[in-house]
Image (cartoon, rainbow, N blue to C red):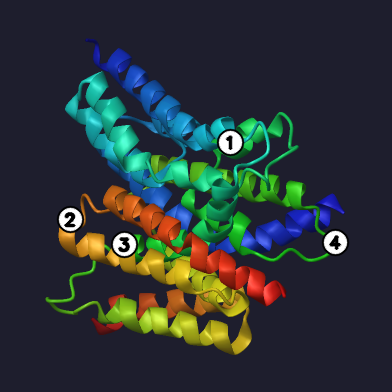
Amino acid sequence: MKLKTYKRAFIHTLPVMAGYIVLGLGFGILLRVAGFGALWALCMSVFIYAGSMQYVGVSLLSGGASLLTVAVTTVMVQARHLFYGISLIDRYRGTGIKKLYLMHALTDETYSLVTGTHLPDFADEKTYYFAVSLLNHLYWITGCLLGSLAGAVLPFSSEGVDFAMTALFVTIFVEQWLTEKEHRPALVGVGCTLLCLLVFGSENFLIPAMALILLALALLRAPIEKKEEKSRG
Amino acid sequence: MDKTLHAILAIVIMAAVTFLLRMLPFVIFGKKQTPAFIGYLGKYLPYAIMGMLVIYCLKGVAPLVFPHGLPELIAILTVVLLHIWRRNTLLSILGGTVVYMLLVQLVF
């Protein structure tokens, strides 16, 4: 049944493929312009494997930023990843040595697929998690390499295709809204982030937004769990 | 410092810090029984994070200047309506993306 699970994972990851290839292309082109060729693009996409961080990384590399700056910037840009593991501790339990890879490959998109999709009965969930992680990683590597090698000569205008990523998150948001009766966490996520975007601007809003979300969820814990108990009877 | 060496070290640091951030929750809470508060967060955080990521994707939209975020708004409405109508993830994403591409390439 492994093959069937991989097939399902492939279908679920198609939108990520579209988004990653396009974003990867952009990264590969930028990195080449900054003076670093395909081998660098390959290493960064394999070992860092993070969209926004690699974009920031291009300017860190070409600007010769101090290594301390590199470390601090990485913490700032990637802090949201601290969130992701929290909801996957139980899902990823008992995956053995593969867990190291599952943790490494935990991007925004992989996170949303792993937490947001309903698996059909035949699928083995641990295999599915691994398949989604691996496929997404391969799309990303492919995109970065393509951008580095052939970026300048695209046959058609792909402008706007990266919206696939936004559409993926919106779709999962709607799906969760339709299946879960408790809407407050979803509203907290949108509301806190929007508020912080307005207050702190588009460069610095993510970390305050995460702090605010944690605070709001902590405050809502009692009422949410009370409602949960009630609905269980 | 030599430019190549600097680049290698910088990449190692970016990779290591990123991995550390991704691994930390598993290391801190993974060993024993998950604390009740973390269990609660684990259950409800995904809903909040998905909302956060949607806004994060839209951070570059400027509603005060042309085209006032209209392509994004129309495309997102398309995704939402398609998804409520058919509950087919691929259709919703594909439909929204095609609408968005047509809007930014041909209309706005």
Residue A228 lies, in percent from the top left, at: 62, 69
Compared to residue A79, the image places residue A171 above or below, namely below
Q: Is residue A188 visible?
A: yes
Q: Residue at x 57, y 74 (%)?
A: A175
Q: Chain of mark 3?
A: A
The span from disc 4 to disc 3 (Cα, nearest Å) is 37 Å
**Mark 3: few/some/many CA within 10 Å (<14, 14-19, 20+):** many
Q: Which residue is mark 2?
A: A200
- Reading the image, the residue beneath label 4 is A122
Residue receiving disc 3: A193
- Marks 4 and 2 sit apart, C-alpha to C-alpha, by 46 Å
Categorize mark 4 by other alpha carbons within 10 Å: few (<14), some (14-19), many (20+): few
- Disc 2 versus disc 1: distance between alpha carbons? 31 Å
Q: Reading the chain from its start, which is encountered first: label 4 or label 3?
A: 4
Which amino acid is tagged 1? Answer: Phe
Q: Secondary structure at mark 4?
A: loop
